Amino acid sequence: MTITIALPSKGRMKDDASAIFERAGMKIVAVGNDRSYRGRVEGWDDVEIAFLSASEISREIGSGAVDFGVTGEDLVREGLADADARVEFCARLGFGHADVVVAVPEVWYDVDTMADLGDVAADFRARHGRRLAIATKYWRLTQQFFSGSHGIQLYRIVESLGATEGAPASGSADIIVDITSTGSTLKANHLKILSDGVILRSEACLVRARKADHQDNPVVDRIMAAVRAAL
Amino acid sequence: MPLINLPAFAGDLLADFERMETLRVDTPVIQPAEPFLDMAGEDLRRRIFLTQSETGESLCLRPEFTIPVCLRHIETATGTPQRYAYLGEVFRQRREGSSEFYQAGIEDLGERDTARADARAVGDAMQVLANRLPGRRLKVTLGDQSVFEAVIAACGLPAGWQKRLIHAFGEPKQLQKLLAELADPKSAGVFGHEVERLAIMGMLEDEDRLVALIGQTMEATGYSTNASRSPRDIARRLKEKMGLANTRLDKATLAVMREFLTLDLPLADAPAALFRFAAKSGLKIEAALSLFDARVAALSRAGADIGLIRYRAAFGRPLDYYTGLVFEIEVEGEAAVLAGGGRFDRLLTLLGAREHIPAVGFSLWLDRIEQAVAAGGAK
């Protein structure tokens, strides 16, 4: 049986992932030309590579259409319900670092923790005639963190697919949940991260779809061992 | 409208509702999603079936009846008091059971005699269940948010802490966490370095100066001062938060609150027990207790079997529109909740009603009642 590994199709993520596989003794070569979306691994005939976009990779692992994928933990946890039951995070690859954080306007001097935010959210409707609005593309992570971990129910999510950090200043939302790697964009937009507001410390991971036929496939174990050894 | 998947007892149930002087209403299955998400919170999004109109309006399959019935009441500008009854399908993603099932219930809007209306809601729910399940012993659990609120207020906690605790009522884990924080001086509030700077500048004592400073900072950083929290909101809450951080509950008060939350006893004994508890602990909660007492009296007068009802002080629902009575009904010895209800005096104003409309109601899980009926027949 052929094992399919989905890798990012472009950018730093593609280069960093290829470098790790090369160190693991799995040199990846494109099938056809350089821009091709299929690849193979030199000397591993039963492995094929699919180059996909990072968010597609999490979906394809979730559905089991591919066996392994390299993508951000944030995208997997956001894209899949019950992520840990459906996939295994085999290795953290040390690149693509990004934290998913809760950030509020710096000028909210009274808000430094999720408990503070809970207080503000509880009162928001009475004071402003609407719920506290959170701009984010991370619906699932936000709900789990606010409702599940901190007992905060009273907020509304405003979907934001780009320039999320600008939402509070423009008035389209009150606070944001977004990724940050250095925090400089947040700072430039006069936002601060809550002291207990890191939802997830994400990085690129080698992720395996939990499929029954992986049980007695030696190639699966060999791939995991090779990548771990290369880190 | 004879639907073949209706529970066999639907007709009898509707006849009961009619005898209970209600107006039967129906609401569209496809509803705007906003009011549900606004009232119950984003968590509901995972459990309802959402779709969109061509123009992008968020729509959902009716997940329950209370909000649609209340919206209909507001839109049709019907006078109050008015008792509505409904029976129809609702749609929710559940762990167990089908995601489309029947619910029925009564919503009593605008009745000013709180005790009487509460007693009627509990009594009617017990009655319709008893009629479907003759010979089965029902178990009713009753809680009261307003008694909890009165206890918290009488304990002399600052407003901020009261709000936190009230908000957590009905979520035992969250409530215990907050009580532990109140007892433990280690977990003081977290203040950013900005606040230290303000303290050094002497800004924290002078609210007006603080408000002005926050306003200037917002303008300088391109934040609008009226789109979200205003400078005064922030200044006031900062003061409130300093109060929160400085509050330590003494052991005696904490013990009083913990003792209250463990109260679990037959409803008939509850008023006397609550009066004793208040006297012993020195809490001034007469207003809430007299309403509680009046409700118990009204239940007896209405002929409800009070022996089936237990009062549990910690029983509540963590939704901010519930204000007083909450209750649940099961068959004794079985886990399935067959009916749930409560008082939601804040809901109609939240949904846009111009005047305050007190409201109480209950809903019945017809699929579970059907199973209980079948299980009874098998025995």
Image (cartoon, grey):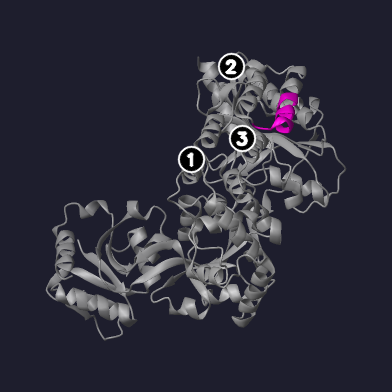
Q: Nearer the viewer, residue B210 or B322?
A: B210
Residue of label 2: B137
B84 with respect to A213 (left or right): right
Range of residues picked out in magenta: B283-294
Q: Position of residue A104 (x, y in %)?
A: 53, 68
- Check disc 1 and give the amino acid type: Gln
In space, the residues marked 3 and 2 are separated at their CA atoms by: 27 Å
Task: Give the spatial CA distance, label 3 vs label 1.
Answer: 44 Å
Q: Which residue is mark 1?
A: B176
- Classified by dominant secondary structure, the portion drawn in magenta counts as helix
Label 1 in the same subunit as label 2 = yes
User: Judging from the image, what secondary structure is the residue with disc 1 in?
Assistant: helix
- 10 Å crowding of disc 1: few (<14), some (14-19), many (20+): some
Q: Quadrant of residue B327?
A: top right
Number of numbered discs on residues: 3
Residue farthest toward the right in the current orientation of the protein? B79
Give residue A8's quadrant in the image.
Answer: bottom left
Which of discs 1 and 2 lies nearer the camera? The answer is 1
Q: What amino acid is at disc 2?
A: Arg
- Which badge, 1 or 2, is on the more N-terminal residue? 2
Please state the chain letter of the residue tagged with numbered disc 1 in the rendered image: B
Q: Secondary structure at mark 2?
A: loop
